[in-house]
Image: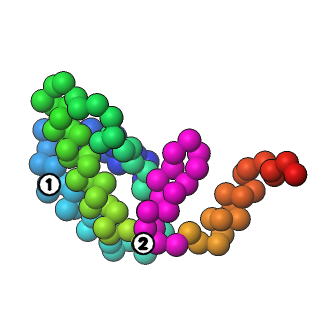
Amino acid sequence: MDCATFWLTNLMLANRDIETEQIRLLAALSVCAAPIVVVSNEVGQGIVPETSLGRRFRQAQGQLNIALAVQADLVLQVVVGLPQILKGTMPWLVCIWYDMGRPMPKR
């Protein structure tokens, strides 16, 4: 699912009930038989937004990210292309794929 941040933005701009929609999303994800990758933005590590809407969005995005992480088996934070495991264990297949995408270090 790319991207949880756009999903939330669209709901907020449409004046939808964020709590209800988040419950529906998490329920749908929990019963899906296929593996799911959810991409989201971390918006809480920057400046505090000046506008009320911006502050509400920042709070709602943080709550959504926490709820998704609680339910997930694996949580990665990728910063400048480097994945950091925050929860779970990286599957070996993903490790191989990640290593294949990087140039070999010079010796």
Residue with the mark numbered 1: 19
Classify mark 1: residues with Cα within 10 Å, few (<14), some (14-19) or many (20+). few
Does the magenta segment cover residue 83? Answer: yes
Is 56 above or below relative to 26? above
> Earlier along the polypeptide chain: callout 2 or callout 1?
1
Does the magenta segment cover residue 77? Answer: yes
Which residue corresponds to the image point at 65% horizontal and 65% vertical from the top-left?
95
What is the C-alpha distance between the residues marked 2 and 1? Answer: 22 Å
Which segment did they paint magenta?
Answer: 74-89
- Return the residue nearer the eye: 49 or 101: 49
Q: Report the predominant secondary structure element of the magenta stretch.
A: strand
Indicate left or right for 93 with 64 as reference: right
Which residue corresponds to the image point at 42% horizontal and 56% vertical from the top-left?
38
Instruction: Please indicate, yes or no, whether residue 60 appears anywhere in the rendered image.
Output: yes
Q: Secondary structure at mark 1?
A: helix
Which residue corresponds to the image point at 33% horizontal and 74% vertical from the top-left?
31
| Residue type of the residue flagged with mark 2 | Asp
Residue 36 percent coordinates (x, y): 45, 64
| Residue type of the residue flagged with mark 1 | Glu
Residue 77 percent coordinates (x, y): 46, 53
Q: Nearer the viewer, mark 2 or mark 1?
A: 2
Which residue corresponds to the image point at 59% horizontal and 45% vertical from the top-left?
81
Indicate left or right for 61 with 81 as reference: left
Residue 13 percent coordinates (x, y): 20, 34
Residue with the mark numbered 2: 73
